[in-house]
Image (spheres, rainbow, N blue to C red):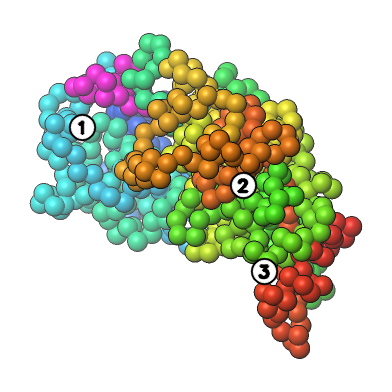
Amino acid sequence: DRLVEYAKEMNEYAISAEGGEEYIRIVPRKKSVRVNWGGFTMVKATLVALNTAFGLDHYNDLRKQTKNVTKLAEEEGTDAKGRPLHDNPHAFKFHKLIHLASTTYPLASNTEIRNTIASHPLDANFLHIILRPQNPTPSVWNYFVECDDAVHRIYRLPILNYERGNGVDIYTSSQWFIISRDFAWYLADPPKESFVDYYLEYIEHVVVADESFFGTVLRNTHFCATLHNDNFLHLQFDRWENEAAGQRDERKCIMKNPDHCGRSPTTMTLDYLPTLELSGDLFARKFDDAVEPLIKDYIDKRREKEEERLKREKEFMKDMEAENKTESLPLEEWEFQGEGVLIVAKETVGDKEPLCLGMEKDNNKVLLRPCFRKEVPPTLSPNWETGAVIIEETISYNRWDIGPCSSDGDLKRNETGELEMIPGEYSVTGPKCMLKIGDGARAGRCLDVDSERNQPGGLMHIYPCVTKWHQLFSFGNGTIAPRGAIHASLPLHIVRQLENKKKNVTAQLCLGVKGRGDADESSWDEDKGKNEEEEKEDNQDAEVGPHPWEQPDADLYPNGRKSLQLWSGQQIQTTPCSNSGAVIEWYYVPFIIEDYGDEEGMISDADASSSEKSSGNSATMSETDEEL
């Protein structure tokens, strides 16, 4: 009742004080739907809400009061048969309808939301659909009914599948969407004998019907070509209900097998904010003020900053256009003027062959590998890591782009070549960044902790970017991680899962090497499920014999540690940030591109090592960092 009263007051104010129109509408209490997890009532509640948005409640009441269709057409704007039109005077005026849960919250500013949606065709429908049709086995496809505030399995249900001769494919999709007015109207008031009219009778008895209804309707009707397969909603699913540490919610375990349960999205916590910020999504769920009361406040602050940034960009571009200029917006310090960065192992900068973070040419593996062409290291100046290097003198697949990065905290390259991390208001690890490979066919793909491995020993690869925790990295400042280290942080919900399973928890996973640290690594391989390729490699390693670092006469650094050169060509893996010796600390050296001029042309590799354009000179440019 209070919500209805609030809506009434706000609508009256909008109409009288601002000259606007009604903009809040509540589903009438007599038509509200009590929703059960996994039941058809979720679909029904959505369709009832669409009815209310289009003013169909009003017309349904009118039809009960009068059968005079001519009067309805003249006075209420119906068609000749007394059916309301989508643009009837009682319908909301809108181009797009956004369907959100009460636990959903906007991530982007209002301007960004509007700009993103408006950048697509007016008839676009934004749903997340798995484009492979469902084809379940008969034993798990059952007929369900709802009663007593629960969903009950009764018997098996015939499967709809095109290949089985039904002429229909069922698709799994999200029940949260952004759809066009035309599609919303089709759902709210489907024509008689339409696909929706036919499908509703069947889907009413399918478990989790909301995830099989809206996408299936879109894919099996003339709206199919309007699909944009992204609903701009960020979800992070937690454990399955049968994995609950305490008492499980039996409402989510309704199949014949009691351990065949459903799950719900995890509740967002502060540690997850960088992932939300970098996701590119407009909304996220789910949020719970009782569990995490501050997270929405931080999101609101960022939305305000984003709104201000968009205004500044608009003004900047307007000024550039007025002055007929083509200047770009200034870059962040960690963007290194757009040419990328060489990530150099600190301990090797004085070696005959400095080693860098790089990618193997023929696959996705991330290795410790030589930074430069063979003729270049002898020409390097002292303290070359504090300046810049010529991109043509480095080996391919060593160039990285840092970013995008989250905004809480700060990153600055200091005079020693390190990235200085400054913690943020809520993030003790400072900004989290993607690290993208800058060379080759895989350029633009992200550094990734393989298979989302949440225990030490995860091998590093390059994979397509997905904006999840295992592709977001922080930079150590000597507190949580060693100074100069690169590390990934386990989300709080994963930490809790591991704790509930009585497993060891390593919340901060640093990039490092195997067999060099103080920690006992024997259990890491046991915990890691290996695929056939990894098993084959292990067998090959066993045939070759001990690794270079396992030799009794292995080279040592003055600090007593084995030389990192022994790990040249070896794949980088995650290790606890406390594992001294195994964790690699890094310098970040930006690239410059030499402009040889039209007359000079390209110099040869031999010339590059002896000319004044060598990295021996370019690497001393720290006093002119502003030009880089």
Q: Residue at x 33, y 38 (%)?
A: 211
Whole-percent x and y of residue 143? 16, 30
Contact, CB < 8 Å: mark 1 with mark 3?
no
Residue 536 vs residue 330, the one in the foreground: 536
Left or right: where 177 falls relative to 517: left
Q: What is the distance, in whole Å, between disc 1 and disc 3 at their CAs?
A: 64 Å
Vertical relation: 392 (above or below) 415: below
Image quadrant where residue 424 sits: top right
Classify mark 2: helix, strand or loop.
helix
CA gap, disc 2 and disc 3: 23 Å
Q: Nearer the viewer, mark 1 or mark 3?
A: 3
The 10 Å Cα crowd at callout 3, few under 14, some 14 to 19, many 20 or more, is some
Q: Residue furthest front?
A: 553
Q: Which residue corresponds to mark 3?
A: 392
Q: Is residue 17 magenta?
A: no
Residue 255 among magenta residues: yes
Kindly report which numbered mark, 2 or 1, lies closer to the viewer in this rendering: 2
Tell me the number on the disc at residue 205.
1
Q: Which quarter of the rendered picture does the C terminus lie within?
A: bottom right
Q: Secondary structure at mark 1?
A: loop
Residue 565 numbered mark, or none: 2
Q: Nearer the viewer, mark 2 or mark 3?
A: 2
